[in-house]
Image (cartoon, rainbow, N blue to C red):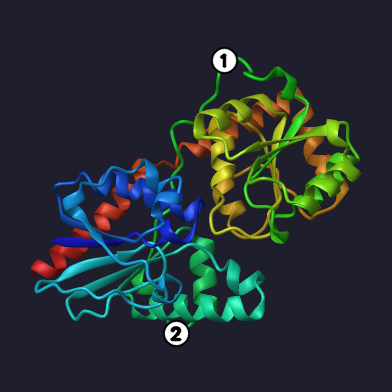
Amino acid sequence: MKIIFDNIIFSLQKSGGISILWQNLLLKMSETNAFKTLFIEYPYSINNIFSRQLKIPIDKIDFRSGRILSIKRYFPPKIKCAEPFIFHSSYYRTSNSSKAINITTVHDFTYEKYFPFLKRIIHSWQKFKAIRKSDYIVCISENTKSDLLNYIPDIDSNKIRIIYNGVSSDYCPLSQKPYPNLSNSILFIGSRVDYKNFDYTIECIQQSSFNLVICGNRLSNEEQIKLDTKLGPDRYQVVENPDNHELNKIYNSVFCLSYPSSYEGFGIPVIEAQKAGCPVIALNKSSIPEIIGNGYPMLRDLTQAEFNRIINQFKNPDIRNKIISLGYQNSSKFSWEKMIQEYTDLYLEISSLIKQ
């Protein structure tokens, strides 16, 4: 059976969790012999750091024009196919072809919860339209499924499958700390938008003896002024977008990861850190309690007292070792190989139903 993958996400962002998922799925699907595959590609994908790592055979790529992509991104791509095919888009698009079996992967409802009116309306229009038109819906966590049914209660829940995100095997414990100078540092990674509670991490570190390591995009002028004022230039450092191997070294060197996000569809850094043997400070909300594992200590609220409570547990060698062990065991449940196999099983299930 033919599967058409819509790679539009690579032209919409330079990096991000959705791009990581899509890249890992395509690494396998571009090589598979189990299906006929075609990949819709747009200009600007070369700017995406994960797209650049793919080597899709040229004869499997359907190059599309990038003209008015800012508008075309919201509408179904034109596809001519005489036989039934699976259409799986990287970002909330479906095919209008009568031969298409549409799959939509739903990551989270961040726009619906946190974005301003106009952006929220446009995004939700596209997302909800894709969900309603899809024959199969994949949610990356039970929490995302619950949110979906809350926002679209009339959707047929039998169409929904849970396929958890994976995590790279590049993350693992190392025998020694690669950067001993970071042993008294707390790591903050990823986006620093409001609901990620970056300011909370700064405030808590200000009241402690720890330093801060920031991994992600370059600081804005406002962020730099805030950090210089709250911590001082000597108490923080920025590592811009490290690759997996460099990030693994950082996870292995720091005291812990601070990930107090108020909302996540999954939360890949939590599992990355656990795989590397790095304790995690996370808030007991959204998908985090689902993916962090049973028995793992979490923030009950965003207060200095709660931050200190978790830090004090991490300072106790016996408790710390137990938490690291819990995290490592939990992280073994998540891998890109497992995720890819579950998507493959879904494609095979659809294919077998079509042949009946």
* Left-right relation of 135 to 111: left
Q: Residue at 42% across / 59% down in the picture?
A: 11
Could you tell me residue 46's position as x and y percent? 40, 50
Marks 1 and 2 sit apart, C-alpha to C-alpha, by 52 Å
In which quadrant is the N terminus drawn? bottom left
In this rendering, the answer to whether 278 lies above or below 91 is: above
Q: What element carries label 2?
A: loop
Quadrant location of residue 354? bottom left
Could you tell me residue 202's position as x and y percent? 82, 45
Could you tell me residue 332's position as x and y percent? 46, 36
Q: Residue at 20% across / 46% down in the picture?
A: 57
Which mark lies nearer to you, 1 or 2?
1
Q: Which amino acid does label 2 sit on?
A: Asp
Is disc 1 surrounded by few (<14), some (14 to 19) or many (20+) residues within 10 Å? few
* Left-right relation of 35 to 268: left
In this rendering, the answer to whether 275 lies above or below 99 is: above
Which of disc 2 and disc 1 is earlier in sequence? 2
Could you tell me residue 45's position as x and y percent? 40, 54
The answer to whether residue 293 is visible is no
Asked whether 283 or 222 is in front, the reply is 222
Q: Residue at 21% across / 44% down in the picture?
A: 31
Quadrant location of residue 82? bottom left
Is disc 2 surrounded by few (<14), some (14 to 19) or many (20+) residues within 10 Å? few
Name the outermost residue toward the bottom: 154
Q: What residue type is labelled 1?
A: Ser
Q: What element carries label 1?
A: loop
* Left-right relation of 322 to 198: left
The residue that mark 1 highlights is 175
